[in-house]
Amino acid sequence: MALADYLRMQREDTPLPGRLDLTLALVQKARDWWERLSPEQRARLRLGVAIPAGLLGFPLGAGLPDLDIAVLGIGAHRYFLTHSALGAFFVRQFLRRMTGGGIGRAVVGGAGAGMALGLGGHLVIDGSFGLLDGQKSVQFGIPGLTDMGSLLSGTLVDDNLYLLANGLWALIMARDMVVLATGKQPEEAQQTASRYFPEPVLSSLRARLRAI
């Protein structure tokens, strides 16, 4: 907090300790409200925030590997760190350490699952041995300090295996984050969504995912 903000709060009628008490009271009221909800209502609320969060996370994850172009330049495109599942791994680890099972967990888990799904799809396509896209090479090394290039010269097998393995790992972590966010397996979460949300809404969401 800036010093000016602190002094302004001190000058106001309500002292700083009173403001903190009010904040804590509001947090406690929110917790009490959550505890009074039935399991079905909680599941509906979790899905209600996890699905939009996942839709936002998907394009972010799909574009994450290509950040190397903006950061390192086109010469380092498909850099091994950006073209890996590390981003999804860090989000999953953070989600595992979150306490409670409220709305915040659903938001982080939904966004993380969508991000991991987009990231995994990107890497699987890149590492498909040319079946889904052209053959790709991965850039290993440290830009500006070491030579950049494939681990095994003369072949792209190692590059494809690296990309494919990281893509599949990201997809597995997407499934993990669905469970962490909703407490349900993906199939169960889909059934719950079908029960709580009208089919036109779900069809619209599926169409948006396919269009990304």
Image: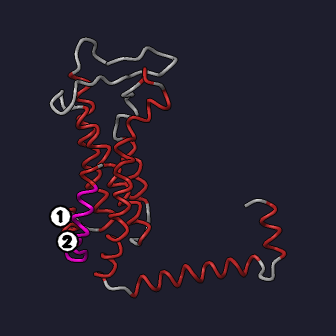
Query: In the image, which residues are magenta?
Result: 193-208
Q: Is residue 65 left or right of residue 124?
A: right
Viewer-side residue, 56 vs 201: 201
Seen at 42% across and 71% down, the residue is 103
> Which structural element holds mark 1?
helix
Q: Main secondary structure of the magenta part?
A: helix
Q: Which labelled disc corresponds to residue 199?
A: 2
Name above or below for residue 4 compared with residue 24.
Answer: above
Above-or-below relation of 117 to 18 = above
Q: Please determine whether, in this image, residue 159 is positioned above or below residue 18.
A: above
Q: Are marks 2 and 1 in contact (CB under 8 Å)?
A: no
Separation of marks 2 and 1 at Cα, in angstroms: 16 Å
Instruction: Give the class, few, some or many, for how many residues have Cα within 10 Å of label 2's Cα (few <14, many ≥20).
Output: few
Residue depicted at 28% across the width and 12% down the height: 153
Quadrant that contains the N terminus: bottom right
Q: Position of 155 compared to 11: left or right?
A: left
Residue 172 included in the magenta stretch of the image: no
Task: Please determine whether, in this image, residue 120 is positioned above or below residue 145.
Answer: below
The residue closer to the viewer here, 4 or 58, is 58
**Labels 2 and 1: the sequence-earlier one:** 1
Camera-side residue of 66 and 198:
198
Q: Residues within 10 Å of mark 1 (few under 14, many from 20)?
A: few
Could you say whether the residue bearing mark 2 is in a helix, strand or loop? helix
Q: Position of residue 21 (x, y in %)?
A: 66, 81
Q: Indicate yes or no whether the magenta region holds residue 206.
A: yes
Q: Position of residue 72 (x, y in %)?
A: 48, 27
The quadrant where residue 41 appears: bottom left
List x then y, in percent, for residue 32: 47, 85
Q: Position of residue 202 (x, y in %)?
A: 23, 67
Which residue matches tag 1?
187
Seen at 38% across and 61% down, the residue is 53
Q: The residue under label 1 is which amino acid type?
A: Glu
